[in-house]
Amino acid sequence: MKPAGAKGAAGVKGAVIRTPNGMSLRFSPRAVAVAVLCLAVALGVGVLLIGSGDFPMGPADVVRTLLGNGTPADSLIVNEIRLPRAAAGLAVGAALGLAGAIFQSLTRNPLGSPDVLGFSQGAATGVLGVIVLTGGGSAAVAAGAAAGGLLTGAVVYAVAGRHGAHGQRLILVGIGVAAILTGVNGYLLTQAKITDAARAVLWLTGSLNGRDWADAAPVLAALAVLGPLVVVGCGRALRMLEMGDDAAHGLGVPIERARLIMLAAAVLLTSFAAAAAGPVSFVALTAPQLARRLTRAPGPNLLPSMCMGAALLVAADWAAQRAFTGHQLPVGVVTGLLGGGYLVWLLVTQRKTGRI
């Protein structure tokens, strides 16, 4: 396949902010506008999501309650029951969008995604091990997801090799590891008790049902720490790497260290997102591509992809709650149906352009 960012970082045009200490930050006004628009959509849909349910509330009532001016009953419903689920959805979508943008930039391929590369399955293996073997709670699940994702990342990185941790080789190795882990996950389900197996199957589908602050906290913390690190600290290096290793090295980028840091950050974001909502499919694949088409800019588009991922996931969750009256679908069903169609379309268009 050809590199996804064919124009490279050299073709990026935009404004530059210079700080008093001599640092500079280049950004595209259109990309910032797209990020702000996607964030506004995500927050707006989040308000609608909070107002949906057996006790419906209008957007004005939801906002008033969030600001602390609601009745005690409204405050209980909004702040204690529905807000954690909406916050988890926003954080999981943002984490997956950012992780997908990193993977697609590093692999220089629109198919680079945690779903394809096996990292979601690795996180799922860690979580299933915790659920099946120990029956642990939210903290143990988050730890299992992080451990499973990091271990999978280490295996993929070792098999692909230092000089193969980008491009088609990484994708092929990831597909093979994902297939192996899918079999391992199926075996773990067969060894579980009925109640644990039912819990695990729902989690594997990808669901935000019943999420509370204990479920949302790990992914919110990971996003708060890793988001600025990647977007601000590693954004330039990622743009340089899209031009190729030789060009990036000539521009002073520590290639192996930068690539390893970004891979680790993307794996952790994917793992904590999986711990909160299960391995929700296709958000990490779709969000960066939609963001790229809206910004019309080369490069990783990290911030727009993060905001687009948040908007996609809460919109899918809102649709999952309203698709069938009296019955809620897991959000992973909606993202799987829509994302699968998008993947087929992407493969067809890539084939027509000669990239596969």
Image: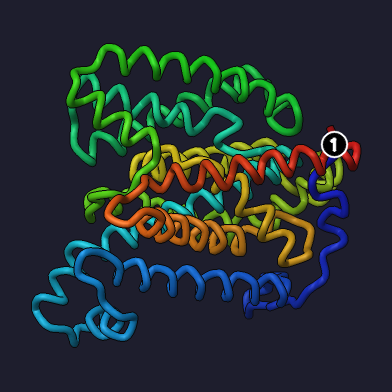
Q: Is residue 273 above or below residue 292?
A: above
Q: Amino acid at mark 1?
A: Arg
**Image quadrant where residue 45 sits:** bottom left
Residue 43 in picture, x, y percent from top left:
43, 72
Q: Residue furthest left?
A: 72
Question: Dot 1 corresponds to which residue?
Answer: 351
Q: Is residue 145 left or right of residue 352?
A: left
For the point 38% across and 29% down, the residue is: 147
At 23% from the left and 50% from the top, the residue drawn is: 210
Q: Position of residue 299 (x, y in %)?
A: 75, 56
Residue 340 is left or right of residue 3, and the answer is: left
Residue 105 makes an appearance in the image: yes
Extreme residue toward the front, this view: 325
Dot 1 alpha-carbon crowd within 10 angstroms: few under 14, some 14 to 19, many 20 or more: few
Relative to 137, is 314 above or below? below
Residue 317 on image: x %, y %: 40, 56
The x and y percentages for residue 267 are 50, 38
